[in-house]
Amino acid sequence: MREPRDRSRTPGRRLNTRNEGKDGSGSADKPVIIHGAIPPRDVLLEFIADNPDRASKREIAKAFGLKGETRVELKDVLRALEDEGLLKKSRKSLTRPGALPPVTVLDITTRDKEGDLIGRPAEWPEDAGAAPAVLIRQSSQDRGKGKAPAAGLNDRVLAKIFANKDRSGPAYTARVIKVIDRRQNSSLGVVRKLADGELRLLPIERRGEEMVIEAEDIGEAKDGDLVETEIVRSGRYGLQRARVLSVIGSVASEKAISMIAIYAHGIPHIFPQAVLDAAEAAAPASMSQREDWRDVPLITIDPADAKDHDDAVYAEMDPSPDNPEGVIVTVAIADVSWYIRPKSPLDREALKRGNSVYFPDRVVPMLPERISNDLCSLREGEDRPALAVRMVFSKEGRKASHTFHRVMMKSAAKLSYQQAQAAIDGRPDDKAGPLLDPILKPLWHAYGILKRGRERRQPLELDMPERKIVLKPDGTVDRVFVPERLDAHKLIEEMMIQANVAAAETLEKKRQPLIYRVHDTPSLAKQETLREFLATLGIPMAKGGQMRANSFNGILAKAEDTPHQVMVNEMVLRSQSQAIYSPDNIGHFGLNLMRYAHFTSPIRRYADLIVHRALVGSLGLGEGGITPDEEAQLEDIAAEISTFERRAMAAERDTVNRLVAHHLSARIGEDFDGRVSGVTKAGLFVSLPTYAADGFIPISTLGNDYFIYDEAHQALTGEKTGLGYQIGDTVEVRLVEAIPLAGALRFEMLSEGKKLPAGTRSFHKSGRRDRSTGRGKPGTRPPRGRGR
């Protein structure tokens, strides 16, 4: 239901009246807005900020009565505002940079003076400043009618966001759509016993506060334990007092590091008994309304340590004379929709989690093991229900047709990526050898054909290798390495992409609502930042027009095998938008696809489960199809699972940071080879590729010079010497501080700066000079002339 409109501020009324001052006289400093004419830029920006749910180009044109050629003019004005960074495009809507999206997950953290609840976004970039406050609107009348759920302090909620038109108090107000999680007024920390016997709670967050624990509030916790606590006294002076609620375990234990991230990000990790009971009660699927595919030699190819197998593949030549040298690729996916029915306990818990979360030492699954590792896992030699798609491709890699089938299958073999690749490379083992000619070679032949289609499509080809952490038995870091990228990985990836495309195309053809995986084009502001940076390296980037993925591939190709290769890859990655889930399709920019939906991993992603249900329902494949209630809630579900995906990524990243900080905490004072991975007004971020670690060098420690921040060059340059540091530079650093609980490292720069182009010494953005030392400090210094 749309929030009631404030009639006094509707564009139609305002545009047809003259702006007046408080005394009723015309105000000379306010523009006269004419209905049907392009409004001033500030009015457009104000309207977009005030009406986030009406900020598409069509809605803006309607609000201001624009028709015909004025709509074209509006498009040009909005594009100019995007170019200047005053607006950014989000799906089909426009928002002010830093503004909250129309549907957001909030954590209710406090109350204002009037007792109203105040929330803040659950996920907010660290470099974006303080997260905005949001006033939670709650109507007892609406709650009584069942229109809005009651929310309380420390709850996590999904909410509809509105700009605060009162201009006083929080910038936004919100209406609660759904209470996601009810949380205690609790925090996480580590118990430390001081020399005098006093007990303290050390925070795990970088911005957390230390608290006192009285002896009577310690419970069974001991020195070094990771505990969950509640605040029992919060006065104006002195440290807050905490009471231990539960002991998670010793911070030195094997599982402690990932548990910190699980608790800190509010990731549900314990299945309620009702969910476990439902999983145990589930019976194997029947043959009802299924095709018998148990003789089709589908195989699974997964990591060697995989416990669940949700996809299997098979390929063969197309016997049709109408498709000479064509192939048929079959992808079968575990039929999770048979077991997880809408509104069931298993379904509610799966939506609450949104996805599985993967840590170096554990997995927090979306579904109980009875489902994920047993009934839905495509185990070798066992009957398993699946939803399969047969895709026919021409020899040029163009898809001619596809069909979906609900089947019963039996995996012919379980192989690891390394096993399959070794067999193709001429080193088959006893298991892969018999599969080489009948199964593996046809799969690789089909992959060669699919590659032709991929090369023609030209998706974004970033070279950003992912590192893997291997732990010792005690849970500490053993080594960090980059797994080899095999053709076996690429084969499975491309076949899954094609299956996802087929799912989206089928549902669109059936006019069935679904959740897409969408990836917007880079904003014009980010494009301009990248263009300025590339210009400093002599790499041209076209200005204006619609950028395509292959445009970025051309940039990456120019940087290949140069000292700037890693730097350019990182900057191109930073220029990209974030992929999200949405019921509105805008295509997938990175993959260069018009229609794309996640279908191939329903064991670990709720979005895929929704797509399975949509296919089952729209194709009449039996029980477990999507319901009208689900279709009505797709926008909310998409926003929710997009947030949970970001939550999982943040938790995984924090865990790696803490593990590495623990690993390096015994090496304070040692020197390391690193690379400048980020440049800000406050200093340099440096990564240690060998350890997958990132640390910070404050600008005040760089040297006895005034360092100038140049955003275009992504550099800090000394004003006196002209020497500085730029993103991508290889440097030598010394570790001077490690904070394991926060996952933070601080370095000292050992390498001399290099001579940078003269343009980097402009006062584009600069640090404030510390007059006593001459060292740069974060801040803004008034420019002494443009281009100086």
Image (cartoon, rainbow, N blue to C red):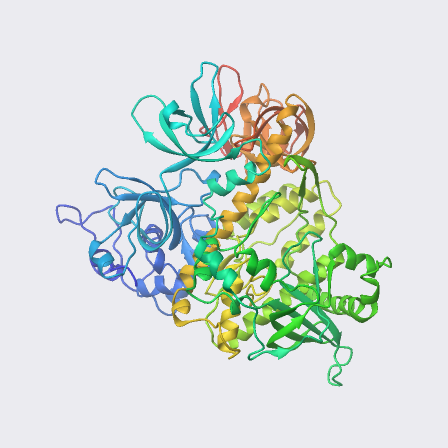
Instruction: Work out which residue is located at the far left of the displayed protein and give it.
Output: 23
Instruction: Work out which residue is located at the far bottom of the displayed protein and give it.
Output: 321
Q: Residue at x 46, y 67 (%)?
A: 341
Q: Is 442 in front, or is 75?
A: 442
Task: Reply above or below: 618 against 584.
Answer: below
Which of the 4 quarters of the picture holds residue 500? bottom right
Left or right: where 74 falls relative to 294: left
Rendered location of residue 704, percent (x, y): 58, 18
Q: Residue at x 59, y 31 (%)?
A: 695
Instruction: Work out which residue is located at the far right of the displayed protein and give it.
Output: 426
Left or right: where 39 falls relative to 291: left
Task: Reply above or below: 277 against 625.
Answer: above
Rendered location of residue 425, percent (x, y): 84, 58
Q: Is 761 in front, or is 673?
A: 673
Left or right: where 737 falls relative to 269: right
Q: Tell me if residue 714 can be seen.
A: no
Q: Is 458 in front, or is 399?
A: 399
Quadrant of the image for the N terminus? bottom left
Total tally of numbered discs in the picture: 0
Task: Reply above or below: 19 against 674.
Answer: below
Rendered location of residue 125, percent (x, y): 47, 42
